[in-house]
Amino acid sequence: MKEFVLIFRNTTDPHANPSSEQLEARMNWLGSVAARNKLADKGNRLSAREAKTVKPDNVITDGPYTEIKEFISGFMIVKTATIDEAVELARSNPILKAGGNVEVREVLTFNND
């Protein structure tokens, strides 16, 4: 099994409290991934307000920037045989119904070729 990180992006305020229906949909989706034994790490939400970017030459900027149209709102790690299987899990995430999107990336280890 490989591990893939699912990175959740929103176009709306990621800190807005979800409705009870949205929260239930999220929890049901997370539960369905766990029930299939595909959940490696439930991850967490990421702050859009308390964030900095560190660049070369000791440059530190606030972030995310107000001109950015998307915020990374959270992540989780799933374990699947292929990226296609991880994408299939991501396709049913309720964030897609709210205008968000999910980036899927393989987690590389020193054992990867």
Image (tube, rainbow, N blue to C red):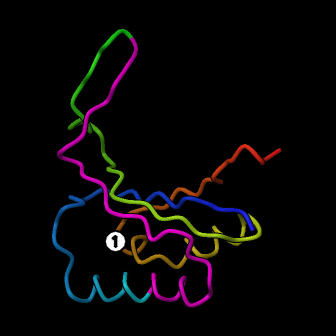
* Rendered image quadrant of residue 26: bottom left
Q: Is residue 62 above or below residue 81?
A: above
Residue found 69% across the figure and 47% down from its top: 109
Q: Return the residue found at the far front.
A: 110
* Rendered image quadrant of residue 106: bottom right
Q: Amino acid at mark 1?
A: Ala
**Left or right placement of residue 34 versus residue 50 in this view:** right
How far across and how far down the image is residue 59, in percent? 29, 15
Q: Range of the magenta residues?
A: 29-56
Q: Is residue 40 above or below residue 61?
A: below
Q: How many marks?
A: 1
How far across and how far down the image is residue 112, in percent? 78, 47
Quadrant position of the N terminus in the picture: bottom right
How far across and how far down the image is residue 42, in percent? 45, 71
Residue found 54% across the figure and 82% down from its top: 33
**Left or right placement of residue 112 versus residue 68 in this view:** right
Residue found 26% across the figure and 39% down from its top: 64
Q: Return the residue found at the far right.
A: 113
Residue, disc 1: 98
**Left or right placement of residue 86 versus residue 44 in this view:** right
Q: Residues within 10 Å of mark 1 (few under 14, many from 20)?
A: few
Q: Is residue 40 above or below residue 8?
A: below
Look at the image and say whether residue 31 sits in the magenta stretch.
yes
Quadrant position of the C terminus in the picture: top right
Q: Return the residue found at the far top.
A: 57
**Left or right placement of residue 72 versus residue 50 in this view:** right
Q: Nearer the viewer, residue 36 or 21?
A: 36
